[in-house]
Image: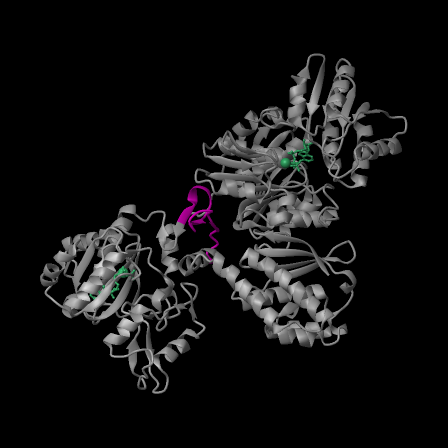
Amino acid sequence: MKILKTQTLYGPNFWSINHPHLIVLQLELEDHERRLSNEMSDFCDQLVKVLPGLREHHGSRGCRGGFLQQMQEGISIAKIIQHVALELQNLAGMPVDFGRIRLAATPGICRVVFEYQNPEAGRYAGRGAVRICQSLMNRGYYPQAELEIDLEDLQEIKAEDSLGPTTEAIINEAQKRGIPWQELPVRHVVQLGYGKYQRRIQTAQTDQTNILGIEFAGDKQATKILLEAASLPTPLGEVIYYFDELEEAIDQVGGFPIVIKPLDGNHGRGITLNINSWQDAENAYDVAKEESKAGGILVERYYRGKDYRVLVINGKVEAVAERVPAHVTGDGHLTIEELIEDINRHPSRGSGHENILTRIEIDRHTDDVLATQGYDLDSILEEDEICYLKATANLSTGGIAIDSTDIIHPETVWMAERAAQIIGLDIAGIDITCTDISRPLREVDGVIIEVNAAPGLRMHLQPSQGKPRNVTAPILEMLYPPGVPYRVPIIAVTGTNGKTTTTRLIAHIFKQTKQVIGYTTTDGTYIGDFLLESGDNTGRQSAQLILNDPTIEVAVLETARGGILRSGLGFNRCDVGVVLNVAADHLGLEDINTLEDMAQVKTVVAEATDDNGYAVLNADDPLVANMAKWVKGKVAYFSMNPHNEIVKEHLRKGGIAAIYDGGFLTFCNGQDTLQVEQMVNVPSTLRGLVSFMIANVLAASLAAYVQGVSIENISTGLRTFQASLEHTPGRMNLIELGKFHVLIDYAHNPAGYQAIGEFVCQWSEGERIGVIGGPGDRRDQDLKELGRLSTQMFDWVIIKEDDHTRDRPRGDAARLIREGICQEKPQFNYQEIWDETEAIQTALAEASEGSLVVIFPESVKRVIALLK
Ligand code: ATP
Ligand code: ATP
Ligand code: MG
Ligand code: MG
């Protein structure tokens, strides 16, 4: 058994629209192909011994234990690998459950597909699953120690890529709301949404968090001055820079007990609480000095009481938590050290912020804190006696949180909300010390100790006691208030032929609305009139390039089969999904062997249209029209035939369609019709002569129409879009060269040849000459078909080869085309000149008066240079 290829999908894909994150393993099963699980003695029992969690898997039965039953009755090893890969991730703390398998046309090869949370962990789990199953089949066991290493590795990968609990919680909430997100390649910043509606967050800090607010919050003295000036209660305190100022400062705050801390500290570093002697104050001064970057030291009166964190989001208190420093509770037997070990073993404790709670570390502070209570690590506490291990209540040093949202006094709510605004933070963590949060601060000697920017959300989301508060919801509601979109309109265009042309035409129509249009095509990625990157940009990365751009107001994305199969769509949903046609091209690649398979690939675009969006489908192509049943949003059809039955039925039900009727582009909305433009006025159709271009025009206009573009703008767009070398290089570029015409077109598959043929056959001024060829990676039968079709549209042809033969021996594609010609018309007049330049030159030299020389080039740039 061997993994031949591993693919990672990131967007809606061939396998699933709702499970965008999938690993696809291409497996060579060798002699295991036909072996079923029940025929391998002991295999199932051993497997369940290694991974008991498999008992819980549903399998296709859809009930607990369903998978186990299936395994006992007999299923393929591929299906088992899928479940093992899922289970490994589950065990490593990454719950996933979606998977599929599919046999390839080649015997012994299959695809195993399963969900991941972390792509690297997913790939690892795939390899692990194969390893485990192989070991069980060959050796009859898989050592527990190895499984433990696998799980540790997986957990490590997870931890390394972790964005932290706060960011991850916000992302989860975004995902729930259908808001797309992605990590930017810098500083763990996460982008939400697309185009001009994108927002950014970095933990609980947003792109609108005021920089001055962050600075004030980071400077404890500035915070106090601002709050004090607004009559909010703050600790009595003095700032000093030199040791000889300490004594006076202590007097100023009313003597012991005091607190000493660095002015610019955080996470409780360098802070000493409840200082009661000059000796301790001296030590505390040194500790604080060491931690302080700027050298400022804050001496404060020590306020007794509990520690509360009040979370204010967008001007409102959303949660309150009491924070209790790390502590242990005695049982009369265990030492403090043993009690700590006991607590740290609890599954909710992890290192740093990786888990709900953090493990308690024993350090110098712990010894000090124990000493003030008269204990050391070996002391044994009485039953129920509480002993604190840290001076401050930070979760990151092992503290716990108790939700107190429901008991905070309304006046304190009002104060906290004011404090957040005074400091200037959209998300603020206000630290309050008082003996009882349910009473007004003034009655319980309460003070605002400080205000924190980017407060941690862990303590509110998963408090150790009390009600969890989903504080990520108000954050998202602040970033995207009701009615504010999170993505720009996305129009995705797929099909076998005409994608680039239609994409460009849609972009051109939208340009009439004066918005900033980003679009990607096989020729390059553009924003407005400017080229961002040239090249075949029809996959996920180029889509993301456009969608990540903050200037974009509308995105039009050519979406090709290759990209869909390789990595899934580059967006989670589109507003308009256009499917032009499905014809024979690229068959036999990546195990897509039939037109029906290919239709299924392209259906992904139709299926990924938003519930409120439109799939624009070709009613004349049964494979495309049939996609309607997968569309969750609405369907709009286009058709060259005003009597198309599907369209008629659709209109009867009140649907929308675009048809070509009596020389006009006509929009139908239920029984209402509107003539939009006469095709003779649309230059890209060569005054209505090129029917495939008319079809593209219908599709493009309809896509714009369902997105609300005005008829006037659509009409202007159509009239001003030229099939010129500049607008659509390589697509129906008809050029007059004195005594004859040249037509340059990228047609490279039978449907493309046929489409062009329709126009060529109408040429009556002279000879029809073809310079023909085809891409080397297509099936033999497709190349032969190109030859056959050429005999029907041309008087004579020159067969040429591409420079890049795509793994075929040089001359092989030409040979197949030649065979196609000879089979169809043995007497047909052809020459074979492999070099494209030479072939074109010959054709131009031999072209007679009035003739039409049709060139299907590999490189349009080269032809243009040649013609010049
Ligand atoms: P963090 O990053 O955890 O907020 P920090 O380094 O910013 O810590 P402070 O917030 O100033 O430090 O203090 C940490 C904790 O120490 C407070 O939450 C509070 O419990 C306690 N504390 C600080 N100053 C005082 C004070 N004057 N009186 C009583 N307790 C105090
Ligand atoms: P590719 O897969 O190479 O990116 P594409 O789908 O983007 O192709 P275009 O570049 O727009 O297609 O057009 C390529 C050729 O396909 C055109 O030059 C024309 O010959 C033919 N073609 C364009 N539109 C259609 C159509 N609607 N039906 C059939 N053939 C078409
Ligand atoms: Mg603090
Ligand atoms: Mg294209």
In the image, residue 180 lies in the stretch drawn in magenta: yes
Image location (x, y in percent) of residue 154: 55, 63
In the image, residue 607 lies in the stretch drawn in magenta: no
* Picture quadrant where residue 647 is located: top right
- Could you tell whether 207 is left or right of 831 in the image? left
Q: From this viewpoint, is residue 688 visible?
A: no
Q: In which quarter of the image is ligand 2?
A: top right
- Could you tell whether 464 is left or right of 711 in the image? left
- Count of numbered circles on the image: 0
Q: From this viewpoint, is residue 53 visible?
A: yes
Please state which of residues 262 and 791 is positioned toward the viewer in this rendering. Answer: 262
Relative to 259, is 565 above or below?
Answer: above
- Residue shown at the point (65%, 60%) measured from the top left: 100
Image location (x, y in percent) of residue 846: 78, 16
Identity of the residue furthest to the right in this view: 826
Image location (x, y in percent) of residue 375: 28, 79
Q: Quadrant of the N terminus?
A: bottom right
- Residue shown at the point (36%, 78%) measured from the top left: 337
Q: Quadrant of the C terminus?
A: top right
Magenta residues span 176-200
Relative to 268, is 241 above or below?
Answer: above
Image location (x, y in percent) of residue 160: 48, 58
Please state which of residues 15 and 799 is positioned toward the viewer in this rendering. Answer: 799
- Residue shown at the point (40%, 63%) measured from the top left: 353
Please state which of residues 607 and 159 is positioned toward the viewer in this rendering. Answer: 159
* Picture quadrant where residue 20 is located: bottom right
Please state which of residues 344 and 173 is positioned toward the viewer in this rendering. Answer: 344
**How does the figure colour the protein chain or chains?**
one colour
* Picture quadrant where residue 302 is located: bottom left
